[in-house]
């Protein structure tokens, strides 16, 4: 099996190239994904040149690699593809792209750019320790030019602010709420909540506790996806092992794992069993729920408090790709529609950031071009509020429209009238 990460063949560049050509040939005969992302557009343009004439075997190595480099792991092509397992052709385009990136990184080394962007824990810890200084520095053109020159972070890319108090610090000092719990969860907070936007985590805790759900915060690291973006599989697996150990223990205590970030919930559900391969990783995957997936299950069981006191007005809700990839429907929008007086318009457009790809100097301009339909739809909706579960999509929307998107859990918390301190 070409995607067995524990096989020596997984890492051999000639075999990776052979598999790229095989899959590209299958894609050439299908072309269902041509509108999804720059990878497929570039692939088909290369295949349609006179010298290649549709023969993937004639593609130059540079053309093979360019498709890999343009993939930002939105995962949407997997659900579009008619040839995914158990089909005998066994096409898994996103994981093949990861394999190609990982094999190249193992042979040639992980770049400084990918090491920096992948180490969100280190960047987050340093940023929150010096939050005032870091946030000020990120507004300065010379500092942004320095970041672009040294670590390849585009100088015009808007960046999230660092929080002065990390979410885990707030969680450990807060006053516990007294109630008889109807359920118990372990919150996988995500790096964005921990270091940049603790308000999202606070709102999640407030909404869960409003619904008599006991919330624990087990020890946790980055989910590992940022390292995977750069092919740093070994580094990602080290983080995954730590998370699996802590989260599996929480599951054995009778807790479901609840995640407010789509990329992280996708990682825990889909990639942890593949990358870690342990029984505990499979246990964690089977007990992981996106935050709104969990809340709407409470609603289906008649256990969700629907006594809302404030109206959010019209909400333009952006559905992130990594939620679409989980085949969950529109759970966040569904819950927002339960609030009296709400009007929710769902926008299903890719933000073109997806992990670290849209932050890089090489792809910043292209990421904005990919997101243009999203910007137009947000502006055309003329909403009172803009919402997205994805923090990077929110950054992109803010950059492209001037709107300030919020996580939908914050809108729900406000509708309840709960204001966590």
Image: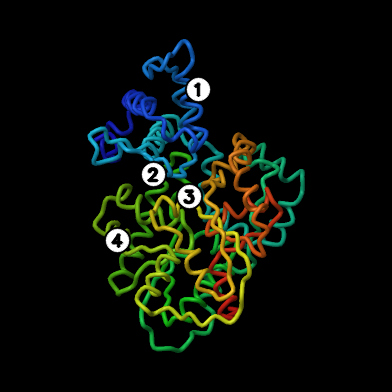
Question: Dot 2: what SS?
Answer: helix
Where is residue 146? Give x, y as percent. Answer: 70, 41
Q: Which residue is mark 3?
A: 321
C-alpha span from label 4 to label 3? 21 Å
Q: Measure the alpha-carbon separation of dots 2 and 1.
A: 34 Å
Bin the neighbour count of mark 3 within 10 Å (Cα to Cα): few under 14, some 14-19, many 20 and up.
Answer: many
Residues at marks 1 and 3, CA–CA distance in whole angstroms? 25 Å
Nearest to viewer (mark 1 / mark 4): 1
Tell me which numbered mark, 1 or 3, is placed earlier along the sequence. 1
Query: How far apart are the two marked residues, 2 and 3, measured between alpha carbons?
Result: 26 Å
Residue 210 at what x, y percent from top left?
48, 81
Circle 1: is it few (<14), some (14-19), or many (20+) Cα within 10 Å? few
Residue carrying label 2: 234
Dot 4 surroundings within 10 Å: few (below 14), some, or many (20 or more)? some
Residue found at x 37% / y 77%: 184
Q: 395 or 55: nearer the eye? A: 55
Mark 2 vs mark 4: in front: 4
Tell which circle, 2 or 4, labels the residue nearer the N-terminal end: 2
Q: Nearer the viewer, mark 2 or mark 1?
A: 1
Image location (x, y in percent) of residue 321 = 48, 49
Residue at the far right in the pictured view: 141
If you read the primary sequence from the N terminus, does the residue marked by circle 2 or circle 1 appear first?
1
Residues at marks 2 and 3 touching, judged by CB atoms closer than 8 Å: no
Q: Is residue 36 left or right of residue 277?
A: right
Q: Secondary structure at mark 4?
A: helix
């Amino acid at each position: 099996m070409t995607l067995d990460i524990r096989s020596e063949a997984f890492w051999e560049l000639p075999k990776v190239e052979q598999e790229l050509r095989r899959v590209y040939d299958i894609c050439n005969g299908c072309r269902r994904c041509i509108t999804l992302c720059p990878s497929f557009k570039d692939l088909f343009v290369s295949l349609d040149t006179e010298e290649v004439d549709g023969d993937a075997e004639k593609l130059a190595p540079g053309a093979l690699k360019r498709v890999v480099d343009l993939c930002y792991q939105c995962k949407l092509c997997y659900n579009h593809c008619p040839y995914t397992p158990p089909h005998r052709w066994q096409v898994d385009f996103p994981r093949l792209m990861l394999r190609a990136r990982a094999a190249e990184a193992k042979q040639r080394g992980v770049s400084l750019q990918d090491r920096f962007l992948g180490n969100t824990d280190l960047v987050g810890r340093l940023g929150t320790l010096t939050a005032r200084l870091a946030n000020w520095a990120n507004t300065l053109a010379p500092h942004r030019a320095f970041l672009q020159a040294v670590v390849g972070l585009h100088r015009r890319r808007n960046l999230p602010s660092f929080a002065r108090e990390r979410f885990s610090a707030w969680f450990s000092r807060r006053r516990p709420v007294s109630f008889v719990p109807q359920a118990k969860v372990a919150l996988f907070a995500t790096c964005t909540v921990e270091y940049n936007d603790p308000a999202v985590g606070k709102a999640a805790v407030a909404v869960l506790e409003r619904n008599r759900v006991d919330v624990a915060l087990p020890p946790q690291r980055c989910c590992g996806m940022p390292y995977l973006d750069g092919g740093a599989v070994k580094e990602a697996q080290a983080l995954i092992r730590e998370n699996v150990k802590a989260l599996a223990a929480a599951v054995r205590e009778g807790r479901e794992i609840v995640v407010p970030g789509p990329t992280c919930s996708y990682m825990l559900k889909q990639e942890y069993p593949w990358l870690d391969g342990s029984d505990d990783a499979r246990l964690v995957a089977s007990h992981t729920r996106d935050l709104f997936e969990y809340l709407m299950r409470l609603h289906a069981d008649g256990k969700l408090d629907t006594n809302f006191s404030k109206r959010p007005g019209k909400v333009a809700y952006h559905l992130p790709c990594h939620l679409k990839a989980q085949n969950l429907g529109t759970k966040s929008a569904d819950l927002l529609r339960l609030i009296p007086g709400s009007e929710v318009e769902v926008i299903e457009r890719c933000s073109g950031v997806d992990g670290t790809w849209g932050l890089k100097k090489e792809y910043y301009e292209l990421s904005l071009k990919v997101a243009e339909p999203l910007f137009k739809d947000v502006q055309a909706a003329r909403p009172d509020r803009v919402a997205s579960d994805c923090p990077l999509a929110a950054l992109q929307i803010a950059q492209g429209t001037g709107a300030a998107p919020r996580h939908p859990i914050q809108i729900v918390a406000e509708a309840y009238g709960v204001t966590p301190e």
